[in-house]
């Protein structure tokens, strides 16, 4: 039992935070694929044109940077970015396994590819940090109740977790702790992809000025002051990475950047 519980304790790549997650990456990826298929059933998908090409270009660079910084998890992901035609939705998301979506409302809202990359890097960071599996674990334990520990490390726990509602469980808003962690990791991913991380501060302030109720992306995020403070703390290191990347967005030396920011428990 102790061994099983220990195996479920993982470390978030890039921050060093300890998390409890009863799911394996393969289980998470399979759930992400299933939830993605369900979410796409009624979506109006754009598969060509300038907006599509723009998202794919930024997405490819984000994926390459993520694989450099977080190779173990990022190389298990498919890195698919679907463009959904919804001009009212200023949002993006990525499910476990690298199944992502960007809404045209977000593409229209951002003022540069740098800003778009910051958002896409943030969403990729949720998958990199395995926030979906961590949240599903929390949901499974809530359902299992007082006797959860007795089955937490076998297939019954996995089945119970799936039973709480796969699609909803993976697409519900993240906690503020998760959002702050994704802000941090996403900033570094965008910087290593060759996008100016300084654009993040102006973007978040502009989003906040529109009101969290109007922009889905901000629905459970930390307050503006908290977010800006975190970004400012990380900015010198992120900007240094950005300056050391080539024009094509590839790190000039992957070995230099893989562990640029030493893990620190949070």
Image: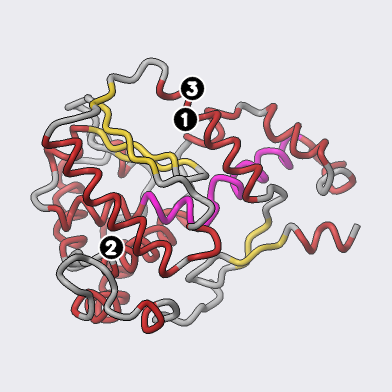
Q: Is residue 157 above or below residue 167?
A: below
Indicate the secondary structure of the residue bearing disc 1: helix
Indicate the secondary structure of the residue bearing disc 2: helix
Percent across and percent down for residue 119 are 27, 51
Whether residue 8 sits left or right of residue 214 in the image: it is right
Whether residue 145 sits left or right of residue 28 in the image: it is right
Q: Nearer the viewer, residue 245 or 86?
A: 245
User: Do tag 1 and tag 3 residues touch (Cβ < 8 Å)?
Assistant: yes
Q: What is the CA distance from the residue labelled 1 to the residue labelled 3?
A: 5 Å
Would you name the residue on which mark 3 appears? 38
Would you name the residue on which mark 2 appears? 190
Badge 2 density bin: few <14, some 14–19, many ≥20, Cα 10 Å: many
User: Do tag 3 and tag 2 residues touch (Cβ < 8 Å)?
Assistant: no
**Mark closest to the chain's N terminus, 3 or 2:** 3
Badge 3 density bin: few <14, some 14–19, many ≥20, Cα 10 Å: few
The extreme left residue here reads 111
**Mark closest to the chain's N terminus, 2 or 1:** 1
The extreme top residue here reads 42
Q: Which residues are magenta?
A: 123-143
Would you name the residue on which mark 1 appears? 36
Percent across and percent down for residue 61 are 28, 57
Q: Is residue 122 above or below residue 170?
A: below
Q: What is the CA distance from the residue labelled 2 to the residue labelled 1?
A: 24 Å
The circle on residue 69 is none
Residue at x-position 29% and y-position 69%: 192
| Quadrant placement of the N terminus | bottom right
């Amino acid at each position: 039992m102790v061994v099983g519980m220990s195996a479920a304790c993982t470390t978030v790549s890039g921050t060093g935070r300890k998390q409890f997650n009863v799911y394996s990456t393969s289980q998470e990826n399979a759930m992400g694929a299933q939830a993605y298929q369900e979410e796409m059933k009624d979506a109006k998908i754009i598969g060509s044109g300038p907006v599509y090409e723009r998202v794919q270009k930024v997405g490819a660079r984000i994926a390459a940077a993520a694989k450099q910084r977080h190779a173990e998890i990022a190389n298990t992901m498919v890195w698919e970015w679907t463009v959904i035609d919804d001009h009212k939705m200023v949002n993006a998301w990525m499910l476990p396994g690298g199944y992502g979506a960007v809404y045209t409302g977000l593409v229209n809202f951002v003022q540069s590819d740098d800003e778009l990359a910051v958002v896409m890097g943030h969403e990729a960071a949720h998958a990199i940090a395995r926030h979906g599996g961590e949240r599903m674990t929390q949901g499974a334990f809530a359902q299992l109740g007082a006797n959860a520990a007795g089955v937490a490390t076998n297939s019954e726990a996995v089945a119970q977790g799936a039973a709480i509602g796969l699609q909803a469980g993976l697409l519900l808003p993240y906690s503020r702790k998760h959002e702050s962690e994704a802000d941090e990791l996403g900033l570094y991913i965008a910087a290593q992809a060759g996008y100016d991380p300084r654009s993040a501060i102006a973007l978040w302030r502009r989003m906040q000025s529109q009101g969290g109720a109007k922009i889905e992306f901000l629905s459970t995020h930390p307050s503006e002051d908290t977010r800006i403070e975190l970004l400012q703390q990380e900015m010198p290191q992120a900007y240094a990475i950005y300056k050391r990347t080539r024009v094509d967005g590839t790190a000039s030396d992957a070995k230099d950047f893989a562990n640029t920011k030493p893990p620190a428990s949070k």
